[in-house]
Structure formats: structure tokens, C-alpha cells
Image (spheres, coloured by chain):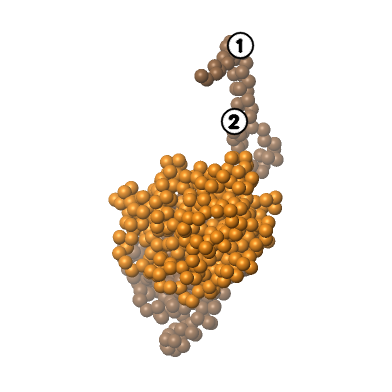
Chain colours: A brown, B orange
């Protein structure tokens, strides 16, 4: 039989209650920021931190608002159908055409060529770093790979012009222009290799050791463990890294402006010069475009298109990495 | 009682080089084995430091040995985890490795299929004879060893794939060309899981309960058709009902496979094993084999005081 709990009655109980209530007020209540005893200096720091934390959010909102405002202005003068319903772009000619697909196509072609280069290179690098490289090699190689992401993109642009284009011309003939989509695409691919390699390697390293051991215990070779267990298990992270890299390729500006040529067109030949959305924005921004002119306003319409595209891809990347996240437990 | 176990075993079983190896003969014979000089090893006494000679019970049962460990030591960097362990693993029996935490049970187990090769800085000395070869020999392919000596881990670790693919995985990578559906079904039946999952083979292996996941891992190991299955505390993460199922399963599997199980649950060792090895780490945390013999002998009539202390729950 259980022992009877001691009972408390009357004033004794009240005392205990009030003690408990006091304890609760003083100790157990979680302190809320901004409440309670804050010194003037504390308040100042608090305020400064709040401003810095919200500043970038306000800047982002401001940019988006400007984009929307100017884009609406543009579409007051140019009907939507002329923008989204055409593949001809000639904003700087007397006969103006604003078919944005020519620019989207140029962007897409260069980004796809970039992915075709970066996915195999990046994934192989990730598999090597995560599964094959001894710790010391990884410690040396990974930072170097990430430094690649810090090289100024203008350098990549001239690298494409001076090193990649001549090779392409040697292969495909001297009548290929020095400015072409293939050269720009390859160099964009090299630029996004670090994104795919680094993020995929993180995802693969996060695969628990126990899964690798399970596969080794069944008589798997290192390659089988890497390609048939670790890579599939890290699938969501790998896909997210590819989508992020793609959105980086789409937003890339300097290298494609230099190496891609300035020829907005809707053709499938990667050896032709093309123009991307970003390169067109550079071209229009460089001249002395009057702020009231239609050429100025179309800048924002194109920028808006670009913004929606990359934002959409980032959302997809997040969705994929959450939707396909594997629970290992 | 015999202090020289291998002397005893030689009289009851033919030397490994001539052993009519039922399972080995079905398979492609391994390339010319660097045969171990068993007699030399025994007579020259590989590491037969008298202080390391564990107490062994005399047993005359006619059993073939699946593995013979001789002077097996393991190191992690400069730390020695186990010291010169010499013991046999009888074929088609359940052998339990018991002892307090940190006595090197798991390390010893992981030496037996070269899993320790995967740990940077790990090193093994000594010999483990498997079908006439020393499986620790660097010329022996560790991948091949692991195909024939499977392993089940402490925490169930199914792949994030379907139940079917989990079981088929090992067979696929080993180039199995037979009827895969049949193999999957057989393996799941042997692991006593078929009836529970036969209608949902496409479901993820991770959707199963812990006990089911562990039986899935056993099915996965069986599907590779190993000769030996090493189990590292296979039931320690499971509830009592699931534990009992795994224990029943071990008894059944012993008809076809040699099983080595690490456990720190003595009741479990008593229930499932035919042979028991008691390991203990001394002051310097180096694991040594104290006593080996038939489980019943170890539990009812231990010869070493330390074994008796452990069995009666005085430490660990």
C-alpha cells in the first residue's frame, strides 16, 4: 500500500502557495527581450542591433518595390503581348522590339551549358572529397575549391575570351566568333562548380556513418557505397545545390557580358553569340539612357523577369531539400 | 582440462587445409590460399605468453571451426584495444562475446570481417583463419571477406530505400543473377519478417518499427548468403518483445549460419548462445580474453574467479 501523502491545510498551505508564486514570478518566468531592467547602454545596443537586423530586409523590400513600380510604368507604354509574346529584341534600334524571350533564351542556353559542365565536375569533386579523400587532402582541397568562388567574375570573362574561345575555334573552325554562347557557358560552368561541389559534399558528409558501414558490411566497394548509398541518401541536398548553382548561373553578369557577345537571338546554335538578360541590363545601363525613355524602363521589366525566375528557383530548391529530406533514424 | 585448445581441436577436427569444406566447395574455390602453418602456429605458440592463455573448458563435441583467432590484437592509433586473443568460433553455433563495457567485444567482432579497416589509424595484428586463409592478410580482399562474413549493427541501419531494395541491395552489388523476388522473399522469411511486410515491399525500410528494421537488416545480411553473421548487440536498442524475436531468430539462423553475437546482457547470452567468451579489460583498459567454453559450463561452472564475479553480477 502506498504511503499517505502528508496533507497541508489552512494558513500553512497559503504560505507555501505564496512562496511558490513568488518563486514563479522571480525565477521561472522567462525574461522577454525589451522588458525588465535594461541599462541605457543595453537599450542602445538593443536598438542598434535591431536596426542592422532589419536594414537588409528593408533594402530588399525597397528594391522589389522599385522594380514593381518601374515595371508597371513600362507596361503602361508597351503591351504585355509585345514583351512576352515575341522573340525579337531590338531595344536600341529605331524600330524597337521588346521580345524578352530572346534574352531568356540566351540566359537559359548559357546556364544549361554551364550545368552540363558543372554537374559532372561538381559531383565528382563532391564524391571524391566526401568519400575518397584522406582528411588532410580534403582540408587542403576544399578551401581552394571555395576560393574559386571568390575569383572576380570579370576575370572569368576574359579567361573565356582568351583561353576557351581559341580552343573552341581550333575545334570548330576559325569562322566561329570569339564571342559565343559555348565559351560563356563553359566559363559559367567553371564558376558554379564550387557551389555544387561544396554543398553536395556537405550533404554527403551528413549521411550517417552507420549507413556506410551497413553497405560495407554487405561487401560493397567504396565506389558502390558512394554511388549507391551515399549519393542517393544525400539526394535532396545534391538537387538543392544544383538548383542554387543554376540560379547563380542565371544571375551571372560580368562573364557572360564579356564572353557571350551582345546578340539577342533565339537560335539553337551554341557557337553563335547570344545576349543574356543580365548582359542586356549592363548594355543599357552603360549608355546615357535618359531616365524617362522607354529603354530605361525596360531595364526594370527585364530585371523583374530575372528576379522572379531566380526567386522561383530558390523556392524550388528549398522545397526540394525539405520535401525529399531523408530521415535516417 | 586442456590448456592447449588447438591441440585439442586438432585431434577432434581435421586440419583446416584438408577440411572437407561443405560450403566452400559449392563456391568457386579461392585462389591458392597462403595456407597457414597451423602446426607451427600451435607448437611455436603464436603469442603463447602464459599470462595470456585464457582458461578454456574442455569440450569434446565434434564441431568444425568457422574461424580460428590466434593472438589477435587491435590498436586505434597508439591505443591498444584488445590484446592477443586466441579462440575458435565453432561452425553453425552461436558464440556470445560477453564482458563489461570497453573490454573490446565490439572491436574483436569488427576484426572478424575487417570492418576496422575503415577506421583511420586502426591496426590489427595476429591471425584469423577462415577457410584455410588468414583473413587479416593484406593480400586478402576485405570486400570479399565482408561478402562472406556479414554484420548486423547495434542500431538498425536500413538504407533509405524500399524494403525490397534493402534486401536486394547486397545481392545486386554482388552481381546476383538468380530470381531476385525469390531471394528477397526467402531472406525475409528467414528473418521472420515476411508475413509482416509482404504486402508493402515498396514501403521505405525506415517506416518500419525498430524491431522490424533490425530484422530487415538481418534479412539484408542473409540475402548475400554469408557463412558467418556477426551481430553487435543486435537487440540493445529494442524493446523486450522485439528482443525476444531477435533471440528466437538467432537460434533458428544457427542452423544455417555461424553466429557471433556481442552482448552485455548475460541473460541473453545464456538464452541464445552455445559458446561464450568472457572478455575483460584490466587497469590499462586493454581487453583480454579471460575464459572460453560452452555457455552452460561458463555460466554454471566458471573456472576463473573474474568470470564468476561477472556472471554473478559483482561488476560490469
Q: Position of residue B159 (x, y in %)?
A: 43, 56
In the image, farthest residue toward the top:
A10
Q: Residue at x 57, y 74 (%)?
A: A155
Q: Residue at x 60, y 22 (%)?
A: A21
Residue A11 shows which numbered tag? 1
Which of the two discs, 2 and 1, labels the residue nearer the N terminus?
Answer: 1
**Distance between the alpha carbons at the discs numbered 2 and 1:** 26 Å
On the image, numbered disc 2 is attached to which residue? A29
Q: How many marks?
A: 2
The reply to the same-chain question for discs 2 and 1 is yes
Quick check: B243 left or right of B184? right
Instruction: Name the residue nearer the viewer: B217 or A37.
Output: B217
Could you tell me if residue A323 is visible in this image? Answer: no
Q: Position of residue A201 (x, y in %)?
A: 52, 63
Residue B84 shows which numbered tag? none
Q: Quadrant of residue A274?
A: bottom left
Instruction: Please determine whether, in this image, residue A218 is positioned above or below residue B278.
Output: below
SS at circle 2 = loop
Q: Position of residue B112 (x, y in %)?
A: 53, 61
Q: Residue at x 46, y 47 (%)?
A: B272
Amino acid at each position: 500500500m502506498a504511503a499517505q501523502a502528508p496533507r497541508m491545510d489552512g494558513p500553512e498551505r497559503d504560505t507555501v502557495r505564496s512562496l511558490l508564486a513568488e518563486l514563479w514570478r522571480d525565477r521561472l518566468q522567462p525574461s522577454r527581450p525589451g522588458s525588465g531592467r535594461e541599462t541605457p547602454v543595453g537599450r542602445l545596443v538593443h536598438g542598434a542591433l535591431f536596426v542592422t537586423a532589419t536594414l537588409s530586409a528593408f533594402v530588399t523590400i525597397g528594391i522589389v518595390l522599385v522594380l514593381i513600380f518601374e515595371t508597371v510604368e513600362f507596361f503602361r507604354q508597351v503591351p504585355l503581348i509585345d514583351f512576352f509574346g515575341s522573340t525579337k529584341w531590338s531595344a536600341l534600334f529605331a524600330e524597337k522590339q521588346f521580345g524578352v524571350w530572346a534574352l531568356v533564351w540566351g540566359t537559359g542556353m548559357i546556364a544549361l551549358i554551364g550545368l552540363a559542365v558543372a554537374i559532372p565536375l561538381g559531383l565528382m569533386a563532391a564524391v571524391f572529397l566526401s568519400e575518397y579523400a584522406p582528411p588532410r587532402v580534403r582540408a587542403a582541397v576544399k578551401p581552394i575549391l571555395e576560393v574559386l568562388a571568390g575569383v572576380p567574375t570579370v576575370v572569368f570573362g576574359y579567361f573565356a575570351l582568351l583561353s576557351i574561345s581559341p580552343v573552341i575555334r581550333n575545334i570548330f573552325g576559325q569562322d566561329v566568333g570569339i564571342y559565343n554562347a559555348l565559351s560563356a557557358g563553359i566559363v559559367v560552368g567553371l564558376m558554379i562548380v564550387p557551389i555544387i561541389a561544396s554543398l553536395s559534399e556537405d550533404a554527403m558528409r551528413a549521411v550517417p556513418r552507420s549507413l556506410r558501414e551497413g553497405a560495407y558490411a554487405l561487401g560493397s566497394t567504396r565506389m558502390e557505397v558512394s554511388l549507391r548509398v551515399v549519393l542517393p541518401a544525400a539526394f535532396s541536398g545534391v538537387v538543392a545545390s544544383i538548383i542554387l548553382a543554376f540560379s547563380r548561373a542565371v544571375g551571372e553578369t560580368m562573364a557572360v557580358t564579356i564572353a557571350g557577345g551582345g546578340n539577342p537571338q533565339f537560335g539553337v546554335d551554341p557557337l553563335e553569340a547570344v545576349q543574356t538578360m543580365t548582359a542586356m541590363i549592363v548594355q543599357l545601363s552603360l549608355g546615357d539612357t535618359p531616365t524617362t525613355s522607354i529603354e530605361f524602363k525596360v531595364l526594370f521589366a527585364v530585371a523583374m523577369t530575372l528576379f522572379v525566375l531566380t526567386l522561383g528557383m530558390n523556392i524550388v530548391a528549398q522545397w526540394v531539400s525539405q520535401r525529399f529530406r531523408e530521415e535516417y533514424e | 582440462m586442456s590448456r592447449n585448445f588447438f591441440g585439442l581441436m586438432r585431434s577432434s577436427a581435421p586440419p583446416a587445409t584438408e577440411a572437407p569444406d561443405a560450403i566452400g566447395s559449392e563456391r568457386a574455390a579461392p585462389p591458392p590460399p597462403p595456407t597457414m602453418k597451423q602446426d607451427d602456429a600451435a607448437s611455436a605458440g603464436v603469442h603463447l605468453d602464459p599470462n595470456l592463455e585464457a582458461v578454456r573448458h574442455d569440450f569434446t563435441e565434434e564441431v568444425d571451426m568457422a574461424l580460428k583467432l590466434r593472438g589477435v590484437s587491435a590498436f586505434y592509433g597508439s591505443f591498444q584495444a584488445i590484446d592477443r586473443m586466441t579462440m575458435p568460433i565453432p561452425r553453425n553455433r552461436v558464440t556470445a562475446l560477453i564482458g563489461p563495457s570497453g573490454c573490446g567485444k565490439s572491436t574483436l567482432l569488427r576484426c572478424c570481417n575487417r570492418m576496422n579497416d575503415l577506421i583511420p589509424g586502426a591496426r590489427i595484428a595476429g591471425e584469423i583463419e577462415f577457410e584455410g586463409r588468414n583473413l587479416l592478410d593484406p593480400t586478402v580482399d576485405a570486400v570479399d571477406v565482408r561478402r562472406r562474413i556479414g554484420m548486423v549493427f547495434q542500431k538498425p541501419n536500413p538504407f533509405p530505400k524500399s524494403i525490397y531494395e534493402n534486401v536486394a541491395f547486397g545481392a545486386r552489388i554482388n552481381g546476383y543473377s538468380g530470381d531476385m523476388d525469390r531471394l528477397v522473399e526467402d531472406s525475409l522469411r528467414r528473418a521472420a519478417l515476411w508475413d509482416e511486410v509482404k504486402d508493402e515491399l515498396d514501403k521505405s525500410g525506415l517506416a518500419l518499427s525498430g524491431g522490424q528494421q533490425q530484422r530487415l537488416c538481418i534479412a539484408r545480411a542473409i540475402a548475400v548468403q554469408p557463412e558467418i553473421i556477426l551481430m553487435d548487440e543486435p537487440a540493445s536498442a529494442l524493446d523486450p518483445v522485439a528482443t525476444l524475436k531477435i533471440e528466437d531468430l538467432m537460434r533458428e539462423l544457427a542452423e544455417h549460419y555461424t553466429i557471433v553475437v556481442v552482448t552485455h546482457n548475460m541473460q541473453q547470452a545464456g538464452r541464445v548462445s552455445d559458446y561464450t567468451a568472457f572478455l575483460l579489460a584490466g587497469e590499462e583498459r586493454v581487453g583480454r580474453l579471460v575464459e572460453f567454453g560452452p555457455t552452460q559450463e561458463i555460466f554454471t561452472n566458471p573456472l576463473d574467479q573474474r568470470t564468476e564475479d561477472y556472471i554473478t553480477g559483482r561488476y560490469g
